[in-house]
Image (tube, rainbow, N blue to C red):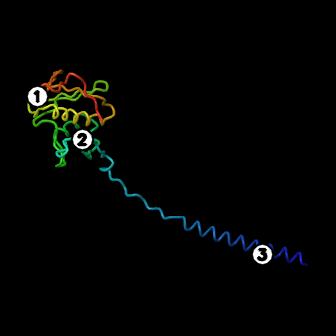
Amino acid sequence: MKIKRLILFIIIVSLISVIIIYFVNSRQKKDTYEEYQPQEEISEEQERQTIISLYFINKTTRKVEPEARLIDVKELITDPYTTIVNMLIEGPKNDSYEKAIPEGTMLISADMSGDVLKLNFSSEFIDNHKGGKEEEEKTIESIVNTVTELTEVNSVRILINGEENQTFKDGAVEFSQDFIRND
């Protein structure tokens, strides 16, 4: 009789323990569930935009620095080089920057040859440049840093009205070699 009572007691205690453990566990699981919050939907216009960096001269520090621009990807698909260089020619949106490419300069053509981007500028690139080796180097740096943001471009060759081996008016910077990015 005592053994039956002991066995009955153990079974009751075991059942109570199982019930308590079940309720404790089910309570913890309820606390860990969170209601799903859907993300904001992306509009078709947002899907088509990307950020590019255009390099301009900082008016205060006189260093060539990037300016981020949001641009529609469709503008880059057909001729990314012409699009980007023309944006560089147009100048910065930020008032603390100034463009490095002289006024009146036009991009005649932009062609890839291997990993070299050949940029053919109008004569205003030379004629309207304010001169000085430092300013000339900043103009080249602005162009090279901008177009080498594109992975396929490793260097830049500058032509003036289709002619190679030109120089700025003072001869300090020659276009006889390909220009590479110097970080």
Q: Secondary structure at mark 1?
A: loop
Estimate how packed mark 1 is, as few (under 14), some (14 to 19) or many (20 or more) residues with alpha carbons within 10 Å: some
| Residue drawn at (63%, 67%) of the image | 25
Residue under circle 3?
12
Specify the quadrant of the image occupied by residue 155. top left
Vertical placement of residue 98 versus 164, above or below: below
Between 139 and 79, the one lying in front of the other is 139
Residue 74 appears left or right of 100? right
Disc number placed over residue 6 in the picture, else none: none
Q: Position of residue 71 (x, y in %)?
A: 26, 45
Q: Amino acid at mark 2?
A: Leu
Circle nearer the N terminus (1, 2): 2
Residue under circle 1?
123
Q: Nearer the viewer, mark 3 or mark 2?
A: 2
Residue 20 appears left or right of 73? right
| Residue drawn at (76%, 71%) of the image | 14
Residue under circle 2?
54
Quarter of the image with the N terminus is: bottom right
Circle nearer the N terminus (3, 2): 3
Per the model, the C-alpha gap separating discs 3 and 2 is 77 Å
Specify the quadrant of the image occupied by residue 162. top left
Per the model, the C-alpha gap separating discs 1 and 3 is 99 Å
Estimate how packed mark 3 is, as few (under 14), some (14 to 19) or many (20 or more) residues with alpha carbons within 10 Å: few
Per the model, the C-alpha gap separating discs 1 and 2 is 22 Å
Q: How many marks on residues?
A: 3
Q: Amino acid at mark 3?
A: Ile
